[in-house]
Image: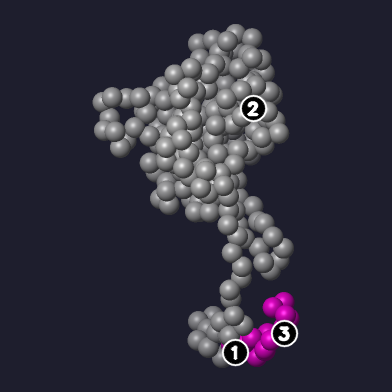
Amino acid sequence: MTQLALVIDLNVCVGCHACVTSCKQWNTSGSAGPLVDENPYGADPTGTFFNRVMSFEVGEYPATQTVHFPKSCLHCEEPPCVPVCPTGASYKRPEDGIVLVDHDKCIGCNYCSWACPYGVRELDEQRKVMTKCTLCVDRIHDAALPPAERRPACVISCPTSARLFGDVHDPDSEVSVAIRERGGYPLMPEAGTKPANHYLPRRLHGDTTRPEQLRREQNPLHVDGRQPAYDGAPLDADWEH
């Protein structure tokens, strides 16, 4: 059975949020309907997003690095959101493995949101229906589009090509090769949901900064002619003047 999915390369994601904004734009004007934002600049804003990027630091100071972690619906092969839905609004398509929500059947009960261990379903506060990533199903199967454009909006917009898209059940597909050769892994496999989306691991690099590189001979921010210089002391020590 075909299982379409995303493979995200954490090593090259720069956290630019191009995937977030392109996803919002495409789906607002597509079959998912308007993804509204209420009181966006107020004290208690709400908004609906299919894709979000979390950024955090790893390692111990001063050897820390920033990791950007995009997350959306993982289109699980055993989606826990489907059996808990009392109206059958949440379902998994047999032809491509995409998990969707039928908004005509959804009553906004939040059962699917509570069942999802990844927190990737969001209630549209205006329409009172559950929303989530559709893998741009209305785009990837649109025969009117050129083949190169039959990909999710987030994949097309990524400036670093950190997002791959394809059939993870096809051993020769780009995504399957990337998972196999680069150690791709699913998120929280212990939940037993068999996520279709995978991540390619971040490869941490050591600090290659040399002490002499910290000496700034031409400091544009100097004050009263004083320039900082590195004297071999710990970096949090007082600067020489």
- Residue 122 visible here: no
Q: Determine the image quadrant of residue 216.
A: bottom right
| SS for dot 2 | loop
SS majority, magenta: loop
Which residues make up the magenta segment?
227-241
Q: Earlier in the sequence, mark 3 or mark 1?
A: 1
Percent of width and height locating residue 123: 59, 24
Residue at mark 2: 193
Q: Amino acid at mark 2?
A: Thr
Circle 1 Cα neighbour tier, 10 Å, few/some/many (<14 / 14–19 / ≥20): few
Percent of width and height locating residue 51: 53, 36
| SS for dot 3 | loop
Q: Amino acid at mark 1?
A: Arg
Query: Which residue is drawn at the image coordinates 26% and 26% (left, top)?
Result: 144
**Residue 226's mark?**
1
Q: Quadrant of the C terminus?
A: bottom right
Residue at mark 3: 233
Q: CA distance from mark 3 to mark 1?
A: 18 Å
Q: Amino acid at mark 3?
A: Ala
Q: How is the image coloured?
A: one colour
